[in-house]
Amino acid sequence: MSDSNTTDFKNPSTFILLGIPGLEAAHIWISIPFCTMYAIAILGNFIILFIVKMELSLHGPMYYFLCMLAVTDMVLTTSTLPKMLSIFWFNSREIDFSACLTQMYFIHSFLEMESGILVAMALDRYVAICHPLRHSAILTNPVVAKIGLAVMLRGCIVILPYPFLASHWRYCRTNIIPQPYCAHIAVVNLACTDTRVSSYYGLSVLFCVRGLDVIFIAVSYVLILRAIFSIPTKDARLKTFGTCVSHLFVILAFYIPGLFISLMHRFGHNVALHFHVLIANLYLLMPPALNPIIYGVKTKEIRGRLLRLFTHEGA
């Protein structure tokens, strides 16, 4: 171990993931809520996929986008949780250099895909409320498929420079990552060369991709709210707004923790490292676990199909 920490090397064969630095004694206890959230994310999103597949009335743009979100959440959590739990349970801290870069790529590309899917869902709500008579003509199945493909390709392409650049840096300080997974900035910080290209590119992705997504969603909801307030009756306004509630909760669950983490990284220098790591982990775990619950509780069609499913099984 000491040799790997002091030797001048390029592309080390392995990295060492510390888990939650400073809380190693509590790893077993920390693993319980993490494992629970992972189980909820996998089971909940699988149920969403199953219900949409089985219920013909749910074969529409909103639910197709929801299925894309469910698949994205399952891949995102699976790219981090198994290794994280192996650290907590078996102290298996080593990760191959190429596996680390692969994990980094999956984490960040699927985060960008999730952001893009939330934009697509905002587009669906905008068309459904502002142009209800043209909704089925605008968002046809081929258009939905093209949007999904565009979101996937965008996430894959914009993150490609992350592992490409990281694989070309020279690492001579240490191969220890003070986290339970290979985040981009954590790997780049280990390099002993000028990594400003990676840092600037990461910021450009944050502002030009995620930032534009937030702006597009905000503009969509300004137009949606304007259309809702033009509806003459209060009951109709509430009913129309109710179709957006699930999406709004999912947006808040995804973007607000991300903003909090970004601010904490820049201004929370006095915050303990283990708190930084815990919050970053929850950011990856909570939205995938919450999304199926939010849609299951707030969406009448999914809730009704789920109740019928368990009622028939119980009968």
Image (tube, helix red, strand yellow):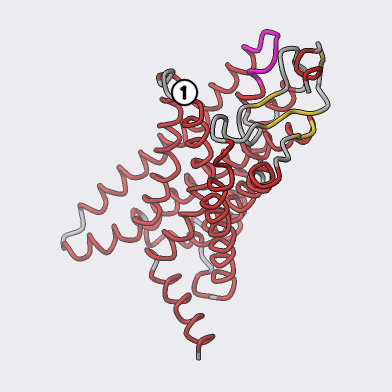
Q: Position of residue 29 (x, y in %)?
A: 54, 48
- Of all residues, the one furthest to the bottom in this rendering is 315
Left of 77 or right of it: where is 57?
left
Q: Can the viewer see residue 154?
A: no
Residue 68 or residue 291, whichever sits in front: 291
Amino acid identity at mark 1: His
In the figure, residue 302 lies in which quadrant? bottom left
Left of 23 or right of it: where is 123?
left
- Vertical placement of 141 versus 84: above or below? below
Residue 193 lies in magenta, yes or no? yes
Q: Can the viewer see residue 180?
A: yes
Q: Position of residue 290 (x, y in %)?
A: 46, 54
What SS does tag 1 mark? Answer: helix
- Vertical placement of 306 versus 237: above or below? below
**Quarter of the image containing the N terminus?**
top right
Q: Position of residue 168 (x, y in %)?
A: 78, 18
Q: Position of residue 75 (x, y in %)?
A: 64, 50
Q: Which residues are magenta?
A: 188-196
Residue at 41% x, 59% y: name it.
Answer: 294
Mark 1: give few (<14), some (14-19) or many (20+) Cα within 10 Å.
few
Left of 12 or right of it: where is 254?
left
Main secondary-structure element of the magenta-colored stretch:
loop
Disc 1: which residue: 265
Residue 148 lies in magenta, yes or no? no
Residue at 54% x, 52% y: name it.
Answer: 32
- Of all residues, the one furthest to the front in this rendering is 25
Residue 236 or residue 36, whichever sits in front: 36
